[in-house]
Amino acid sequence: MVGQNGGGTFVAAYLICILAVGIPLVILEAGSGSLTNRGPVGTFRRINATWGPWIGWFLVAMMLGIMSYYFVISGWTLGYAIDAVRGDIKPFDEFTSGFASVWLYLLVAVLVLIVILRGISRIERTSMFLLPVLVVTMVGLAVYSLTLPGAGQALDFYFSFNLKSFLEPKTWQMAAGQAFYSLSIGQGLIMTYGSYIPKNVSIVSSSVAVAVTNSAISITAGLMIFPIVFTFGIAPDTGSQLSFEALPAIFADLSGGRFIGIAFFLLLFLAAFTSCAGGMMVAFAPVRDEFHLSRTRAAVIVVAAVTLLAVPSALSFTSVGFMVDGRPFLDVIDTVAGSGVVVAAGITGAALLAWRLPRGQLLAAMNSSHSPRWALLIGRYLLLGAAGLLMIRWLIA
């Protein structure tokens, strides 16, 4: 997203969106889930028993759409981990020249199904140890990347600032989309997580910690990737496959690069896979609870739905090359979901939660010594502010 949207200008807009909007909406959504003890369907039913569940089901459907291409990307991380173990990491075009994307995402789907059937507690315990190892590996690679010949050019790009681009509505649309997407706002995921949070845990402190850590890792990832991109002459606006083109180049150049590549891609797959498992719980829980299905039947239904939806995204990076207007289908749906639908759903949902849930009960559910009324105020009036900005943009155009 940084590569496709102007470098440092986009980074600045993204960080502002995280601080000004992202953190308050995470607090609001997590508090709502904690109050209702339900995911999106149950939470919005609390708001209105007639039309509320339909909003919840819309968020479930949107999460299934996001997971459909996230399964494909997770399959790439698995494929690269396997190739790293075999000592045969290929360029991305060669890696996707056959139907590897299809077979790998199908394997991810099977693994996700197994995890849902057996419960996510084991993968949670594993993640608590291995994900910090991934962060340490990323920091080490970022430090090394900054010693490469292209580091100066990369830093100029990554921290550049263009006032004209900064004031363009598209920059803010994309930045808000990335902020909402990376924090899972407007997707039902935070509500679902909130329903599992123990009552003695401060939702405000947890939400701030999640947002700050997420953003710090995102910035570190850029410091790791862009020096490689400029050193090896890769176009920064390559798209969703950028990391898979840049990282193999650096591992081939490093002393002991094969072992670092094995560790990195295995850990990266774990990070992607845990996101798949967590995202699928947004659909699994309401399908099981609302239709009174067994765990097995509900899991099979939601995983089968995502598997079918993922076919176009998987085929866009195969010998078939499924395109929409000259762009891979996966990139198109990522842009639509990440910069449009997620933002609209997040802002509208926040207004409903902040206005329609009992204010006192919602604040109490957040379990904070300092009552976060500011989060409710932002949730209530963000929709009005967004509508005003759209009107101004329409008038100027």
Image (cartoon, grey):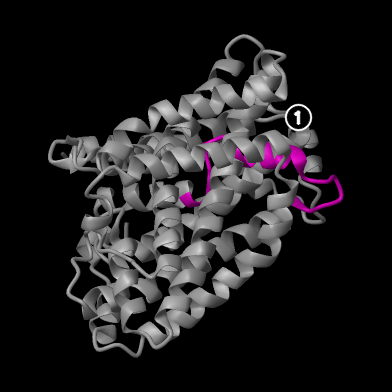
- State whether residue 147 appears in this view: yes
Identity of the residue drawn at 57% across and 12% down: 51
Provide residue 67's location: percent of width, then percent of height.
46, 38
Q: Is residue 249 left or right of residue 367?
A: left
Of all residues shown, which one is farthest toward the top? 50
The extreme right residue here reads 200
The residue wearing badge 1 is: 36
Give amino acid for label 1.
Thr
Question: Which of 5/25 is in front?
Answer: 5
x and y percentages locating residue 130 in the rendered image:
64, 66
Residue 222 or 186: which is nearer the viewer? Answer: 222
* Residue found at x 49% / y 82%: 140
Residue 5 place in picture, x, y as percent: 25, 58
Q: Where residue 321 sits in the image (x, y, percent)?
A: 19, 40
**Residue drawn 48% across and 37% down?**
347
Quadrant (top left/top right/bottom left/bottom right) for the C terminus: top left
Q: Is residue 137 left or right of residue 389?
A: right
Would residue 66 appear left or right of 271 to someone viewing this image? left
Any part of residue 160 in sight? no
Q: Quadrant of the N terminus?
A: bottom left
Q: In the image shown, does 328 or 48 lie closer to the viewer?
A: 328
Q: Quadrant of residue 31?
A: top right
In this image, 269 relative to 161: left or right? right
Q: Secondary structure at mark 1?
A: helix
Q: Which one is in front, 254 or 204?
A: 254
Q: Is residue 274 above or below residue 88?
A: above
Q: Magenta part of the protein: which range? A: 182-203
Residue lying furthest front? 86
Is residue 193 a member of the stretch shown in magenta?
A: yes
Q: Does the stretch in magenta take in 150?
A: no
Q: Residues within 10 Å of mark 1 (few under 14, many from 20)?
A: many
